[in-house]
Image (cartoon, grey):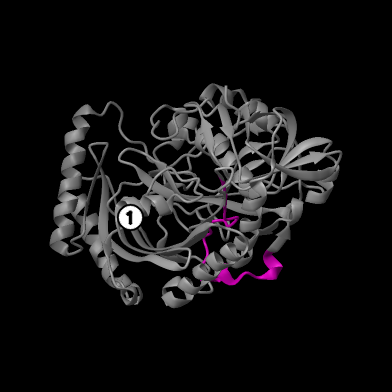
Amino acid sequence: MKRRNFVQLSSMGAGALLVPGALMGKQIPTEALLAPGMDKIVKKRMADVALNTAKSMGASYADARIGRYLNQYVFTREDKVQNVVNTESFGIGIRVIANGTWGFASTNSVTEDGIKKATEQAVAIAKANSKFQTEPVQLAPVAGKGEVSWKTPIEKDFKEVPISEKVDLLLNANAAALDNGANFVNSALFMVNEQKYFASTDGSYIDQDVHRIWPTFGVTAVDQAAGQFKTRDAMSAPMGMGYEYMDGLNSEKLKGAAGLTLYRKSYDMVEDATMAAKQAKEMLTAKSVEPGKYDLVLEPNHLGLTIHESVGHPTELDRVLGYEANYAGTSFATLDKWKSGDFKYGSDIVNIVADKTQTGSLGAVGYDDEGVECKKWDIIRDGILVNYQAIRDQVHIIDQNKSHGCCYAQSWNDVQFQRMPNISLEPGKEPYTVDEMIKNTEKGIYIAGRGSYSIDQQRYNFQFGGTVFYEIKDGEIVGMLNDLAYQSNTQEFWNSCAKICDENDYRLFGSFFDGKGQPPQVSAVSHGSSTTRFNGINVINTGRTV
Protein backbone atom coordinates (compact mmCIF):
# COMPACT_ATOMS: atom_id res chain seq x y z
CA MET A 1 0.00 0.00 0.00
CA LYS A 2 1.30 3.45 -0.88
CA ARG A 3 1.63 6.01 1.90
CA ARG A 4 -0.45 8.47 -0.15
CA ASN A 5 -3.37 6.02 -0.18
CA PHE A 6 -3.04 5.41 3.54
CA VAL A 7 -3.08 9.13 4.27
CA GLN A 8 -6.18 9.58 2.13
CA LEU A 9 -8.07 6.68 3.64
CA SER A 10 -7.08 7.16 7.24
CA SER A 11 -8.20 10.80 7.18
CA MET A 12 -11.79 9.90 6.36
CA GLY A 13 -14.07 11.70 8.74
CA ALA A 14 -11.34 12.05 11.30
CA GLY A 15 -10.85 14.64 13.95
CA ALA A 16 -7.30 13.49 13.63
CA LEU A 17 -4.31 15.69 13.35
CA LEU A 18 -1.65 13.20 12.29
CA VAL A 19 -1.20 10.05 10.29
CA PRO A 20 0.53 7.36 12.34
CA GLY A 21 3.28 6.50 9.90
CA ALA A 22 5.63 5.76 12.78
CA LEU A 23 3.20 3.12 14.07
CA MET A 24 3.07 1.06 10.92
CA GLY A 25 6.02 -1.23 11.80
CA LYS A 26 6.87 -4.11 9.53
CA GLN A 27 4.19 -5.77 7.44
CA ILE A 28 3.31 -9.31 8.51
CA PRO A 29 0.87 -11.99 7.30
CA THR A 30 -2.54 -12.02 8.99
CA GLU A 31 -1.88 -15.27 10.85
CA ALA A 32 1.25 -13.77 12.43
CA LEU A 33 -0.97 -11.43 14.47
CA LEU A 34 -1.89 -14.46 16.59
CA ALA A 35 1.68 -15.48 17.31
CA PRO A 36 2.53 -15.16 21.02
CA GLY A 37 4.96 -12.44 21.85
CA MET A 38 7.85 -12.54 24.30
CA ASP A 39 7.00 -14.41 27.51
CA LYS A 40 6.31 -12.14 30.51
CA ILE A 41 9.06 -13.82 32.56
CA VAL A 42 11.58 -13.02 29.84
CA LYS A 43 10.30 -9.43 29.62
CA LYS A 44 10.94 -8.97 33.33
CA ARG A 45 14.47 -10.32 32.95
CA MET A 46 15.15 -8.04 29.98
CA ALA A 47 13.70 -5.01 31.79
CA ASP A 48 15.94 -5.70 34.78
CA VAL A 49 18.95 -5.63 32.45
CA ALA A 50 18.04 -2.03 31.60
CA LEU A 51 17.30 -0.98 35.18
CA ASN A 52 20.43 -2.56 36.64
CA THR A 53 22.65 -1.16 33.88
CA ALA A 54 21.25 2.32 34.42
CA LYS A 55 21.78 2.16 38.19
CA SER A 56 25.34 0.84 37.76
CA MET A 57 26.11 3.89 35.61
CA GLY A 58 24.86 6.32 38.23
CA ALA A 59 21.27 6.91 37.11
CA SER A 60 18.99 7.95 39.99
CA TYR A 61 15.89 6.68 38.18
CA ALA A 62 15.17 4.43 35.18
CA ASP A 63 12.19 2.88 33.45
CA ALA A 64 11.93 0.42 30.59
CA ARG A 65 9.01 -0.17 28.23
CA ILE A 66 8.96 -3.35 26.16
CA GLY A 67 6.28 -2.93 23.53
CA ARG A 68 4.70 -5.09 20.85
CA TYR A 69 2.31 -3.10 18.68
CA LEU A 70 -0.03 -4.98 16.33
CA ASN A 71 -2.20 -3.16 13.80
CA GLN A 72 -4.70 -4.36 11.23
CA TYR A 73 -6.33 -1.99 8.75
CA VAL A 74 -8.90 -3.03 6.11
CA PHE A 75 -9.86 -0.63 3.30
CA THR A 76 -12.64 -0.94 0.70
CA ARG A 77 -14.25 1.23 -1.96
CA GLU A 78 -17.63 0.48 -3.56
CA ASP A 79 -17.46 -3.27 -4.37
CA LYS A 80 -13.70 -3.68 -4.14
CA VAL A 81 -11.15 -4.37 -1.41
CA GLN A 82 -8.40 -1.78 -1.68
CA ASN A 83 -6.03 -3.24 0.88
CA VAL A 84 -5.55 -5.26 4.03
CA VAL A 85 -2.58 -4.13 6.12
CA ASN A 86 -1.14 -6.09 9.07
CA THR A 87 1.86 -4.66 10.89
CA GLU A 88 4.00 -5.46 13.91
CA SER A 89 6.51 -3.35 15.80
CA PHE A 90 8.56 -4.70 18.73
CA GLY A 91 11.31 -3.22 20.84
CA ILE A 92 12.29 -1.53 24.09
CA GLY A 93 12.57 2.11 25.16
CA ILE A 94 14.71 3.07 28.17
CA ARG A 95 14.37 6.37 30.02
CA VAL A 96 16.76 7.46 32.76
CA ILE A 97 17.54 10.38 35.03
CA ALA A 98 21.27 10.98 35.48
CA ASN A 99 22.77 14.15 36.94
CA GLY A 100 19.19 15.36 37.36
CA THR A 101 18.51 15.20 33.61
CA TRP A 102 16.39 12.98 31.34
CA GLY A 103 18.00 10.66 28.82
CA PHE A 104 16.24 8.25 26.44
CA ALA A 105 17.26 5.58 23.94
CA SER A 106 15.53 2.66 22.27
CA THR A 107 16.34 -0.48 20.31
CA ASN A 108 14.57 -3.29 18.49
CA SER A 109 17.35 -5.62 19.66
CA VAL A 110 15.61 -6.94 22.78
CA THR A 111 18.61 -8.98 23.93
CA GLU A 112 20.88 -8.45 26.92
CA ASP A 113 23.59 -6.93 24.72
CA GLY A 114 21.17 -4.76 22.79
CA ILE A 115 19.49 -3.48 25.95
CA LYS A 116 22.80 -2.76 27.69
CA LYS A 117 23.99 -0.70 24.72
CA ALA A 118 20.74 1.26 24.54
CA THR A 119 20.79 1.91 28.30
CA GLU A 120 24.39 3.11 28.16
CA GLN A 121 23.37 5.47 25.38
CA ALA A 122 20.41 6.80 27.41
CA VAL A 123 22.65 7.51 30.43
CA ALA A 124 25.30 9.12 28.23
CA ILE A 125 22.65 11.39 26.67
CA ALA A 126 21.38 12.40 30.10
CA LYS A 127 24.86 13.24 31.37
CA ALA A 128 25.67 15.21 28.22
CA ASN A 129 22.42 17.15 28.44
CA SER A 130 22.93 17.86 32.15
CA LYS A 131 25.52 20.49 31.21
CA PHE A 132 22.67 22.61 29.92
CA GLN A 133 20.07 21.75 32.56
CA THR A 134 19.26 24.70 34.85
CA GLU A 135 17.02 22.84 37.30
CA PRO A 136 17.08 19.12 38.09
CA VAL A 137 14.06 17.00 37.17
CA GLN A 138 11.58 16.72 40.07
CA LEU A 139 9.59 13.49 40.00
CA ALA A 140 6.41 13.11 42.03
CA PRO A 141 6.74 9.92 44.09
CA VAL A 142 5.10 6.69 42.93
CA ALA A 143 4.96 3.59 45.08
CA GLY A 144 6.15 0.44 43.34
CA LYS A 145 3.25 -1.78 42.22
CA GLY A 146 5.12 -5.06 42.14
CA GLU A 147 3.97 -7.43 39.38
CA VAL A 148 0.52 -6.42 38.13
CA SER A 149 -1.44 -6.64 34.88
CA TRP A 150 -4.36 -4.94 33.12
CA LYS A 151 -6.33 -5.74 29.96
CA THR A 152 -9.01 -3.95 27.95
CA PRO A 153 -12.21 -5.89 28.81
CA ILE A 154 -12.93 -7.23 25.32
CA GLU A 155 -15.34 -9.98 24.23
CA LYS A 156 -13.95 -10.55 20.71
CA ASP A 157 -10.29 -10.19 19.81
CA PHE A 158 -10.09 -8.64 16.32
CA LYS A 159 -7.08 -10.85 15.57
CA GLU A 160 -9.27 -13.96 15.86
CA VAL A 161 -12.01 -12.66 13.52
CA PRO A 162 -11.46 -13.83 9.91
CA ILE A 163 -10.53 -11.18 7.37
CA SER A 164 -13.39 -12.43 5.18
CA GLU A 165 -15.89 -11.43 7.89
CA LYS A 166 -14.45 -7.92 8.11
CA VAL A 167 -14.38 -7.52 4.33
CA ASP A 168 -17.98 -8.75 4.01
CA LEU A 169 -19.12 -6.23 6.62
CA LEU A 170 -17.46 -3.31 4.83
CA LEU A 171 -18.70 -4.38 1.38
CA ASN A 172 -22.23 -4.86 2.75
CA ALA A 173 -22.12 -1.33 4.15
CA ASN A 174 -20.88 -0.03 0.81
CA ALA A 175 -23.65 -1.89 -1.04
CA ALA A 176 -26.29 -0.51 1.32
CA ALA A 177 -25.06 3.03 0.63
CA LEU A 178 -25.02 2.50 -3.14
CA ASP A 179 -28.51 0.92 -3.09
CA ASN A 180 -29.85 4.00 -1.31
CA GLY A 181 -28.54 6.63 -3.67
CA ALA A 182 -24.84 7.08 -2.97
CA ASN A 183 -22.55 7.55 -5.97
CA PHE A 184 -19.33 6.78 -4.13
CA VAL A 185 -18.48 5.14 -0.83
CA ASN A 186 -15.29 4.06 0.86
CA SER A 187 -15.01 2.35 4.22
CA ALA A 188 -12.34 1.14 6.60
CA LEU A 189 -11.65 -0.73 9.82
CA PHE A 190 -8.74 0.29 12.03
CA MET A 191 -7.82 -2.18 14.79
CA VAL A 192 -4.96 -1.88 17.27
CA ASN A 193 -3.48 -4.08 20.01
CA GLU A 194 -0.74 -2.62 22.24
CA GLN A 195 1.06 -5.24 24.34
CA LYS A 196 3.05 -3.13 26.80
CA TYR A 197 5.40 -4.15 29.62
CA PHE A 198 6.62 -1.40 31.95
CA ALA A 199 9.27 -1.69 34.67
CA SER A 200 10.91 0.98 36.79
CA THR A 201 13.40 1.42 39.59
CA ASP A 202 10.39 2.31 41.76
CA GLY A 203 9.65 -1.43 41.88
CA SER A 204 6.87 -1.78 39.31
CA TYR A 205 6.49 -4.55 36.72
CA ILE A 206 3.28 -3.79 34.80
CA ASP A 207 1.94 -5.92 31.93
CA GLN A 208 -0.90 -4.42 29.87
CA ASP A 209 -2.90 -5.57 26.83
CA VAL A 210 -4.74 -2.65 25.19
CA HIS A 211 -7.30 -2.93 22.36
CA ARG A 212 -8.91 -0.24 20.20
CA ILE A 213 -11.18 -0.29 17.13
CA TRP A 214 -12.48 2.30 14.66
CA PRO A 215 -14.94 1.52 11.86
CA THR A 216 -15.63 4.42 9.52
CA PHE A 217 -16.83 5.34 6.03
CA GLY A 218 -17.48 8.29 3.75
CA VAL A 219 -20.57 8.37 1.51
CA THR A 220 -20.88 10.82 -1.40
CA ALA A 221 -23.99 11.76 -3.39
CA VAL A 222 -23.61 13.72 -6.63
CA ASP A 223 -25.99 16.05 -8.47
CA GLN A 224 -24.41 15.96 -11.91
CA ALA A 225 -26.82 18.50 -13.39
CA ALA A 226 -26.00 21.07 -10.75
CA GLY A 227 -22.33 20.08 -10.53
CA GLN A 228 -22.56 19.56 -6.78
CA PHE A 229 -21.76 16.79 -4.35
CA LYS A 230 -22.35 16.19 -0.64
CA THR A 231 -20.64 13.80 1.75
CA ARG A 232 -21.85 12.22 4.96
CA ASP A 233 -19.35 10.45 7.23
CA ALA A 234 -20.05 7.61 9.66
CA MET A 235 -21.70 8.27 13.02
CA SER A 236 -19.45 5.67 14.64
CA ALA A 237 -17.03 6.48 17.44
CA PRO A 238 -13.57 4.96 17.77
CA MET A 239 -13.70 2.83 20.91
CA GLY A 240 -11.49 1.07 23.40
CA MET A 241 -13.25 -2.21 22.74
CA GLY A 242 -12.84 -5.48 20.90
CA TYR A 243 -14.57 -6.57 17.70
CA GLU A 244 -17.85 -6.90 19.64
CA TYR A 245 -18.34 -3.19 18.88
CA MET A 246 -19.38 -4.29 15.37
CA ASP A 247 -22.32 -6.43 16.57
CA GLY A 248 -24.90 -3.66 16.03
CA LEU A 249 -26.98 -4.46 19.11
CA ASN A 250 -30.39 -2.79 19.21
CA SER A 251 -29.97 -2.28 22.94
CA GLU A 252 -27.12 0.19 22.27
CA LYS A 253 -29.04 2.30 19.71
CA LEU A 254 -30.46 5.70 20.58
CA LYS A 255 -33.01 7.84 18.82
CA GLY A 256 -31.61 11.23 17.91
CA ALA A 257 -33.45 14.21 16.48
CA ALA A 258 -34.67 14.24 12.86
CA GLY A 259 -34.95 10.44 12.77
CA LEU A 260 -31.25 9.85 13.33
CA THR A 261 -30.15 6.55 14.85
CA LEU A 262 -27.10 6.96 17.06
CA TYR A 263 -24.87 4.40 18.72
CA ARG A 264 -23.31 3.81 22.13
CA LYS A 265 -21.19 0.69 22.76
CA SER A 266 -22.31 -1.26 19.69
CA TYR A 267 -22.33 -0.02 16.08
CA ASP A 268 -24.55 -1.04 13.15
CA MET A 269 -22.41 -0.06 10.17
CA VAL A 270 -24.80 -1.23 7.44
CA GLU A 271 -27.72 0.64 8.99
CA ASP A 272 -25.63 3.80 9.36
CA ALA A 273 -24.39 3.57 5.75
CA THR A 274 -27.99 3.26 4.55
CA MET A 275 -28.99 6.39 6.47
CA ALA A 276 -25.85 8.20 5.32
CA ALA A 277 -26.70 7.71 1.65
CA LYS A 278 -30.22 9.06 2.16
CA GLN A 279 -28.95 12.07 4.08
CA ALA A 280 -26.21 12.82 1.55
CA LYS A 281 -28.90 12.97 -1.16
CA GLU A 282 -31.09 15.15 1.05
CA MET A 283 -28.19 17.56 1.56
CA LEU A 284 -28.09 18.23 -2.19
CA THR A 285 -31.43 20.04 -2.00
CA ALA A 286 -31.29 21.38 1.57
CA LYS A 287 -31.60 25.12 1.97
CA SER A 288 -28.62 27.28 2.80
CA VAL A 289 -28.54 28.58 6.37
CA GLU A 290 -29.44 32.19 7.13
CA PRO A 291 -26.58 33.66 9.19
CA GLY A 292 -27.36 34.92 12.67
CA LYS A 293 -27.64 33.97 16.33
CA TYR A 294 -29.08 30.53 17.10
CA ASP A 295 -29.43 28.19 20.05
CA LEU A 296 -27.33 25.19 19.07
CA VAL A 297 -28.37 21.67 20.08
CA LEU A 298 -25.18 19.60 19.76
CA GLU A 299 -25.24 15.79 19.80
CA PRO A 300 -22.28 14.01 21.45
CA ASN A 301 -20.57 12.78 18.27
CA HIS A 302 -20.31 16.44 17.28
CA LEU A 303 -19.70 18.02 20.68
CA GLY A 304 -16.81 15.66 21.39
CA LEU A 305 -14.57 17.43 18.88
CA THR A 306 -15.44 20.83 20.38
CA ILE A 307 -14.58 19.48 23.86
CA HIS A 308 -11.31 18.08 22.50
CA GLU A 309 -10.17 21.34 20.94
CA SER A 310 -11.55 23.93 23.40
CA VAL A 311 -11.07 22.09 26.72
CA GLY A 312 -8.80 19.09 26.18
CA HIS A 313 -5.83 20.81 24.57
CA PRO A 314 -5.99 24.11 26.51
CA THR A 315 -5.83 22.32 29.87
CA GLU A 316 -2.65 20.38 29.05
CA LEU A 317 -0.17 21.86 31.53
CA ASP A 318 2.75 21.86 29.09
CA ARG A 319 0.72 24.02 26.68
CA VAL A 320 -0.30 26.31 29.54
CA LEU A 321 3.38 26.80 30.41
CA GLY A 322 4.42 27.31 26.80
CA TYR A 323 6.63 24.21 26.82
CA GLU A 324 4.53 22.67 24.02
CA ALA A 325 2.96 24.42 21.03
CA ASN A 326 3.08 21.97 18.16
CA TYR A 327 -0.16 21.25 16.28
CA ALA A 328 -2.42 22.99 18.77
CA GLY A 329 -0.61 26.06 20.06
CA THR A 330 -0.35 27.04 23.70
CA SER A 331 -3.30 27.97 25.93
CA PHE A 332 -5.36 30.92 27.12
CA ALA A 333 -6.07 28.98 30.38
CA THR A 334 -2.97 30.38 32.08
CA LEU A 335 -1.84 29.71 35.65
CA ASP A 336 -3.11 33.05 36.96
CA LYS A 337 -6.65 32.12 35.89
CA TRP A 338 -6.41 28.77 37.67
CA LYS A 339 -4.83 30.30 40.78
CA SER A 340 -7.64 32.85 41.05
CA GLY A 341 -9.98 30.01 41.97
CA ASP A 342 -12.93 31.73 40.31
CA PHE A 343 -12.18 31.70 36.59
CA LYS A 344 -15.50 31.04 34.88
CA TYR A 345 -14.59 28.66 32.07
CA GLY A 346 -18.25 27.75 31.65
CA SER A 347 -21.72 28.16 33.07
CA ASP A 348 -22.64 26.67 36.45
CA ILE A 349 -23.86 23.42 34.89
CA VAL A 350 -20.55 22.72 33.11
CA ASN A 351 -18.65 19.92 34.87
CA ILE A 352 -15.76 18.45 32.86
CA VAL A 353 -13.68 15.53 34.08
CA ALA A 354 -10.51 13.76 33.00
CA ASP A 355 -10.77 9.99 33.28
CA LYS A 356 -8.26 7.33 32.19
CA THR A 357 -10.39 4.53 33.64
CA GLN A 358 -13.66 4.91 31.69
CA THR A 359 -14.69 1.53 30.26
CA GLY A 360 -14.94 1.55 26.47
CA SER A 361 -12.98 4.76 26.06
CA LEU A 362 -9.92 5.01 23.84
CA GLY A 363 -7.67 6.27 26.63
CA ALA A 364 -8.58 3.62 29.19
CA VAL A 365 -5.60 1.78 30.68
CA GLY A 366 -4.75 0.56 34.15
CA TYR A 367 -1.43 2.40 34.39
CA ASP A 368 0.15 5.17 32.37
CA ASP A 369 3.57 4.94 30.72
CA GLU A 370 5.26 6.10 33.95
CA GLY A 371 3.73 3.29 36.01
CA VAL A 372 1.16 5.57 37.66
CA GLU A 373 -2.21 3.97 38.40
CA CYS A 374 -4.84 5.80 36.36
CA LYS A 375 -7.73 7.74 37.85
CA LYS A 376 -10.52 10.29 37.32
CA TRP A 377 -10.22 13.94 38.34
CA ASP A 378 -11.98 17.29 37.87
CA ILE A 379 -10.86 19.82 35.25
CA ILE A 380 -13.89 22.15 35.46
CA ARG A 381 -16.33 21.97 38.38
CA ASP A 382 -19.52 24.09 38.46
CA GLY A 383 -18.05 26.13 35.60
CA ILE A 384 -14.77 26.94 37.42
CA LEU A 385 -11.33 25.88 36.12
CA VAL A 386 -9.99 23.71 38.97
CA ASN A 387 -7.13 21.63 37.55
CA TYR A 388 -4.96 20.70 34.57
CA GLN A 389 -3.49 17.55 33.07
CA ALA A 390 -0.01 16.87 34.49
CA ILE A 391 2.49 14.03 34.92
CA ARG A 392 5.26 13.13 37.38
CA ASP A 393 7.77 15.83 36.45
CA GLN A 394 5.08 18.55 36.09
CA VAL A 395 2.77 18.39 39.11
CA HIS A 396 5.17 20.23 41.44
CA ILE A 397 4.69 23.28 39.20
CA ILE A 398 1.04 23.46 40.28
CA ASP A 399 1.86 22.65 43.92
CA GLN A 400 0.61 19.06 43.72
CA ASN A 401 2.50 15.93 44.75
CA LYS A 402 0.74 13.18 42.78
CA SER A 403 0.87 12.61 39.04
CA HIS A 404 -2.49 12.59 37.26
CA GLY A 405 -1.42 9.43 35.42
CA CYS A 406 -1.68 10.68 31.83
CA CYS A 407 1.79 9.98 30.42
CA TYR A 408 1.92 8.10 27.11
CA ALA A 409 4.24 7.19 24.23
CA GLN A 410 2.88 6.05 20.88
CA SER A 411 5.45 3.26 20.64
CA TRP A 412 8.48 1.71 22.32
CA ASN A 413 10.83 3.90 20.29
CA ASP A 414 9.23 7.18 21.35
CA VAL A 415 9.76 8.90 24.69
CA GLN A 416 6.67 9.19 26.86
CA PHE A 417 5.22 12.62 27.66
CA GLN A 418 2.00 14.26 28.84
CA ARG A 419 -0.97 13.32 26.66
CA MET A 420 -4.62 14.17 26.89
CA PRO A 421 -6.67 11.66 28.92
CA ASN A 422 -10.36 11.15 28.16
CA ILE A 423 -11.93 14.58 28.73
CA SER A 424 -15.71 14.51 29.08
CA LEU A 425 -18.71 16.70 29.93
CA GLU A 426 -20.80 15.19 32.71
CA PRO A 427 -24.48 14.62 31.81
CA GLY A 428 -27.27 16.70 33.30
CA LYS A 429 -28.38 15.74 36.80
CA GLU A 430 -32.12 15.96 36.10
CA PRO A 431 -34.06 13.68 33.70
CA TYR A 432 -34.11 15.43 30.30
CA THR A 433 -34.40 13.96 26.79
CA VAL A 434 -33.36 15.13 23.33
CA ASP A 435 -37.04 15.45 22.37
CA GLU A 436 -37.62 17.76 25.34
CA MET A 437 -34.60 19.82 24.40
CA ILE A 438 -35.85 20.27 20.83
CA LYS A 439 -39.36 21.08 22.13
CA ASN A 440 -37.91 23.78 24.39
CA THR A 441 -35.86 25.47 21.65
CA GLU A 442 -37.54 28.35 19.80
CA LYS A 443 -34.93 29.26 17.18
CA GLY A 444 -32.14 26.77 16.91
CA ILE A 445 -30.09 24.32 14.91
CA TYR A 446 -29.47 20.64 15.71
CA ILE A 447 -25.97 19.53 14.68
CA ALA A 448 -24.83 15.90 14.59
CA GLY A 449 -21.47 14.44 13.65
CA ARG A 450 -18.06 16.03 13.43
CA GLY A 451 -16.97 18.37 10.67
CA SER A 452 -14.39 21.00 9.84
CA TYR A 453 -12.74 22.96 12.63
CA SER A 454 -10.37 25.83 13.19
CA ILE A 455 -9.04 27.31 16.43
CA ASP A 456 -6.41 29.89 17.22
CA GLN A 457 -3.02 29.28 18.82
CA GLN A 458 -4.27 29.97 22.35
CA ARG A 459 -7.35 27.73 21.89
CA TYR A 460 -9.67 30.71 22.36
CA ASN A 461 -11.39 31.85 19.16
CA PHE A 462 -12.79 29.00 17.08
CA GLN A 463 -15.05 27.82 14.29
CA PHE A 464 -16.69 24.40 13.96
CA GLY A 465 -18.75 22.74 11.23
CA GLY A 466 -20.59 19.41 11.49
CA THR A 467 -21.92 16.46 9.51
CA VAL A 468 -25.69 17.14 9.34
CA PHE A 469 -27.66 20.24 10.32
CA TYR A 470 -31.39 20.62 11.02
CA GLU A 471 -33.31 23.82 11.63
CA ILE A 472 -35.45 24.09 14.77
CA LYS A 473 -38.44 26.47 14.79
CA ASP A 474 -40.83 26.83 17.71
CA GLY A 475 -39.84 23.49 19.21
CA GLU A 476 -39.85 21.39 16.04
CA ILE A 477 -37.36 20.19 13.43
CA VAL A 478 -38.50 21.82 10.18
CA GLY A 479 -35.85 20.74 7.68
CA MET A 480 -32.22 20.20 6.78
CA LEU A 481 -29.72 23.03 6.39
CA ASN A 482 -26.51 23.42 4.40
CA ASP A 483 -23.39 25.62 4.42
CA LEU A 484 -23.17 26.04 8.18
CA ALA A 485 -20.48 26.68 10.76
CA TYR A 486 -20.57 28.37 14.16
CA GLN A 487 -18.09 30.79 15.67
CA SER A 488 -17.37 31.72 19.26
CA ASN A 489 -14.58 31.89 21.78
CA THR A 490 -14.00 29.16 24.33
CA GLN A 491 -15.09 31.11 27.40
CA GLU A 492 -18.21 32.67 25.82
CA PHE A 493 -19.21 29.32 24.30
CA TRP A 494 -19.01 27.29 27.49
CA ASN A 495 -20.68 30.06 29.50
CA SER A 496 -23.61 29.90 27.05
CA CYS A 497 -24.19 26.23 27.98
CA ALA A 498 -27.86 26.27 29.01
CA LYS A 499 -29.05 22.66 29.24
CA ILE A 500 -27.59 19.13 29.18
CA CYS A 501 -29.56 15.93 28.60
CA ASP A 502 -29.29 13.23 31.23
CA GLU A 503 -27.08 10.16 31.36
CA ASN A 504 -29.44 8.09 29.18
CA ASP A 505 -28.20 10.10 26.18
CA TYR A 506 -24.51 9.93 27.17
CA ARG A 507 -22.15 8.67 24.43
CA LEU A 508 -18.48 8.76 23.50
CA PHE A 509 -16.77 10.50 20.60
CA GLY A 510 -13.14 9.73 19.88
CA SER A 511 -10.00 10.68 18.03
CA PHE A 512 -7.88 7.71 17.00
CA PHE A 513 -4.81 9.67 15.87
CA ASP A 514 -4.55 12.82 17.96
CA GLY A 515 -1.21 14.48 17.30
CA LYS A 516 1.18 16.30 19.61
CA GLY A 517 4.88 16.88 20.09
CA GLN A 518 7.99 17.21 17.98
CA PRO A 519 8.98 14.66 16.76
CA PRO A 520 5.23 14.11 16.42
CA GLN A 521 3.37 11.33 18.17
CA VAL A 522 -0.27 10.22 18.09
CA SER A 523 -2.53 9.01 20.87
CA ALA A 524 -6.15 7.89 21.06
CA VAL A 525 -8.62 9.72 23.26
CA SER A 526 -12.37 9.74 23.90
CA HIS A 527 -14.75 12.53 24.87
CA GLY A 528 -18.15 11.77 26.36
CA SER A 529 -21.22 13.95 26.67
CA SER A 530 -24.98 14.01 26.38
CA THR A 531 -26.79 16.23 23.87
CA THR A 532 -26.24 19.82 25.03
CA ARG A 533 -27.72 23.22 24.17
CA PHE A 534 -25.69 26.42 23.84
CA ASN A 535 -27.73 29.61 23.57
CA GLY A 536 -27.13 32.55 21.25
CA ILE A 537 -24.18 31.27 19.20
CA ASN A 538 -23.12 33.06 16.02
CA VAL A 539 -23.77 30.97 12.90
CA ILE A 540 -22.22 31.84 9.54
CA ASN A 541 -23.00 30.72 5.99
CA THR A 542 -19.94 28.99 4.56
CA GLY A 543 -21.39 28.76 1.05
CA ARG A 544 -21.65 32.44 0.29
CA THR A 545 -19.15 34.22 -1.91
CA VAL A 546 -18.13 37.83 -1.51
State whether residue 385 is above or below residue 403: above
Residue plotted at (60% across, 34% down)? 386
Residue 230 located left or right of residue 132: right
Asked which secondary structure carries label 1, the reply is helix
Q: Quadrant of residue 498?
A: top right
Residue with the mark numbered 1: 23
- Image quadrant for the N terminus? bottom left
Residue 242 magenta = yes
Question: Horizontal and vertical percent for residue 370?
Answer: 38, 50
Task: From the viewer's side, name the closer residue of 266 and 441.
Answer: 441
Q: Amino acid at mark 1?
A: Leu
Q: Measured from the top left, where is residue 259 in percent x and y?
A: 75, 56
Q: Residue at x 82, y 48 (%)?
A: 430
* Residue 114 shows in this picture: yes
Q: Name the residue at 57% across, 27% down.
A: 338
Residue 84's x, y, as percent?
Answer: 37, 67
User: Which stretch appears magenta?
Assistant: 229-252
